[in-house]
Image: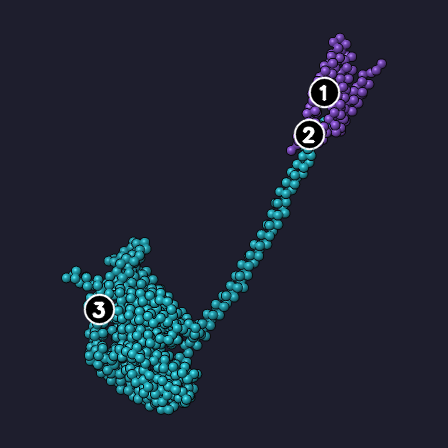
Amino acid sequence: MDNFLQAIDTLTIKFTLAAVLLPLLAFIINLAIPGKNNKITGWISTGAILASTVLSVFVFSRVWNSHQVHQLVTWFTIGDTKVYAGVLLNNLSVLMLLLVNLIALPVHIYSTAYMNNDKGYNRYFAFLSLFCFSMLALAVADNLVLFYIFWELVGFSSYLLIGFWFTRDKAVQANKKAFIMNRIGDIGLLTAILIIYATFHTFDINILFGPNSIIKSISFFNKGEWFTPLTGYFTIPGVSYHLDAIWQYVAFGGIFLAVAAKSAQFPLHTWLPDAMEGPTSVSALIHAATMVAAGVFLLGRVYPMFNNTELTILAIIGCFTAFMAATIALTQNDLKRILAYSTISQLGYMIMAMGIGAYSSSLFHLVTHAFFKCLLFLVAGIVIHQMAHVRDDNKLNIDPQSILNMGGLRKKMPLTFITALIGGLALIGLPFTSGYLSKDGILIQAFQWSEGKSFVYMLIPVFALLTTWLTAFYVTRLIVKVFFGDLRLLKTYPSAKLHITDGGWQYSVPLVILAAGSLFPFFALNPVAYEHSWLFKAFSTGSSPATERVFHIVVPVGVNILSVLVIYGAYVIYAGKKLNPFSPAGALWRLSFNEWYFDRFYNKYIIKPLMALCRGVFRFDRRVIDTFIHSIAYAGMALAKLAAWTDQYIIDGFLYLVTDIVKAIGNFARRFQGGKVQYYLYSMLVVILVIFLLKTLI
Amino acid sequence: MISLTDFLVVSAVLFCVGLYMIVSKQNAIQILIGIELMLNAAILNLVAFGKYDRFNNGGQMFALFAIVLAAATTAVALAIILNVYKQYKTIDPGKIDKLGD
């Protein structure tokens, strides 16, 4: 029996590896295929992700709610420390594996049509496959080092795709911004990994955060120090297993930074709206459904290491981000920007849910949000595509993304309209949608969490509720402005000819798949009770306390009645002919329209001083260090010249003098050796005479 | 009575004339003549000093020997000069400078 189980597990691992590596293979093949717009690349990538999806469905069915599968091999050894690499399959990772595939598949199909006329078709699909590979690998990595590698790769492929149209200056600025912000998070994650390793001497996620998490079970705090008596696992003589307690908070801070950067949380959220410069299909896959969820996934992985203070910080940040992003989304006019802020807001919900201990609801919301937000982005992509067509056909000077030009599209593109409606309702969280199940779960648990705590804690569920209504408002505004009323474009350009359609099957099939995933039957048979959803049950740990019952009725009913009122109100306001019903002069309106001045604040107080510092350092380098080095060089050259002069005129001169003397003597002496006999005699005579003379004189 | 000093003065004059000829003449024959003059100056000295050896006549004897030897060396020197002439087509010792480098 055990052998049989092991064989099945080995098969599961093999399937997982295949599912992860197929997109990488597609990436390599696509890079090798010549040409720039070769249609085969699209089908290679789509085929790879399809196969990967099938494999991950199998893996999911094997592992979900069953035993955990973990296999590893020795990766490398440093000294006595062995580092393992492997695949860890538990509920969380197979869920992520399946989710990424299920979202990536419709996006791939959609992209084959959406990017059809783009010059960088090959490059697009290569990068998309690279992203899928990194994201899938991130989901199944069992080791913090591997996790970090794929975390970086995900960020890098996101950078490539944001700057896909790299000839546009805005896209280049946006991907640079995204990359730098993500680097800040990466530094945090690296710091956290190093601290965890320094404390526990292992990178293994299963040992650290698994069912028998050593962080939870054997590390403890005592008098401000963090003890980890690791007698059972690894004992290295001479190594003390405790650090100052502050390091635990530093590690939390690092992980928080990583989460904030990837999942676009305050204060590192400003890159996500700018990241909309990439193709819309990329926004749908990466910046709405999968990559931004990686931060929440990371929280899910390392959840056991947080203490109550840290969780409260998470809840506050998540709640604040959700509220702030929702208020910003109220006044934006760029279709994709509204959706981007909505994504930030929903991610804030997930982080908040993690913070209040609603672990399962957070992951549940992650999954449901991936479906409906991806759906909304794909809808936005189609709408923008059609608007761009209208612009190009009539040579108009309009922004195809601005919702101020749209309106009345429900008659022209009925399927798109219906799916957008489903996605919108799911985003608001009305009953019978998946969003209702997950979002109300979070709200109910938030109230439950704040119960019995001080008044300040009550602010979190209250603001979460407010955010829900804000969400209802901006979603209604978006849908009404895009799909209801008359096409406002015709008011400015009455002569424009329109050919607006839903598009081919490559557009409609993904929309239908994702719309189906946004409805309740996919997650729970009971449309109003989130506890009954299979996804929630798999992650929830204990039974719910009795007080939950009260909230369970009061919260959803209250939320939804008010939501419906808000929707109706927004419909009345925006379906009217007035373009801007709210005065643009109000302080709150400006705060929202300018995105709470975050970019301006960062520009003024961080980027500008930083640039000034850089320029100052550059100038210092130029003026002081370079001058110093140049003066040293001049001194050296002067010294060298002096040395050359000395060499030439003193040392060489002395030697020349010696040789000249020798030469003179030689010349003088050789005259006596001329070979003439009489000269010899003559000289002999002279010598003798001299000797005689000297003799007589002395 | 002719004194010894007169002999020595004549001999010294002869020697000097011979020496001058040796270093200044450009003809090997004349140089040879110079050598003979110096030799004869020496012989004159021998004869002049021979007056102090009346019993053995050592001075006279040495003079005879020297005359004979002079004749012999002159013969040899003339032969050498002949050969030199054959070799170099000249007997000017200033032009025979193969002894040099």
In the drawing, what numbered circle is on residue A457? Answer: none
Quadrant housing residue A117: bottom left
- Name the amino acid, label 2: Tyr
- The chain that appears cyan in the image is A
Q: Position of residue B6 (x, y in %)?
A: 82, 18
Which residue is located at x 85 percent, y 14 percent? B1
Chain bearing tag 1 is B
Q: Position of residue B14 (x, y in %)?
A: 78, 22
- Name the amino acid, label 1: Thr
For chain B, the rendered hue is: purple
**Residue to which mark 1 is pinned:** B74
**Residue to which mark 3 is pinned:** A58
Secondary structure under the numbered disc 1 in the rendered image: helix
**Residue to which mark 2 is pinned:** B88
- Looking at the image, residue B96 sits to the left or right of residue A149; the answer is right
Q: Position of residue A30 (x, y in %)?
A: 34, 67
Which residue is located at x 21 percent, y 81 percent? A527
Secondary structure under the numbered disc 2 in the rendered image: helix
- Looking at the image, residue A493 sits to the left or right of residue A83; the answer is right
- Alpha carbons under labels 3 and 1: distance apart: 135 Å
Which residue is nearer to you in this view: A282 or A1? A282
Q: Nearer the viewer, mark 3 or mark 1?
A: 1
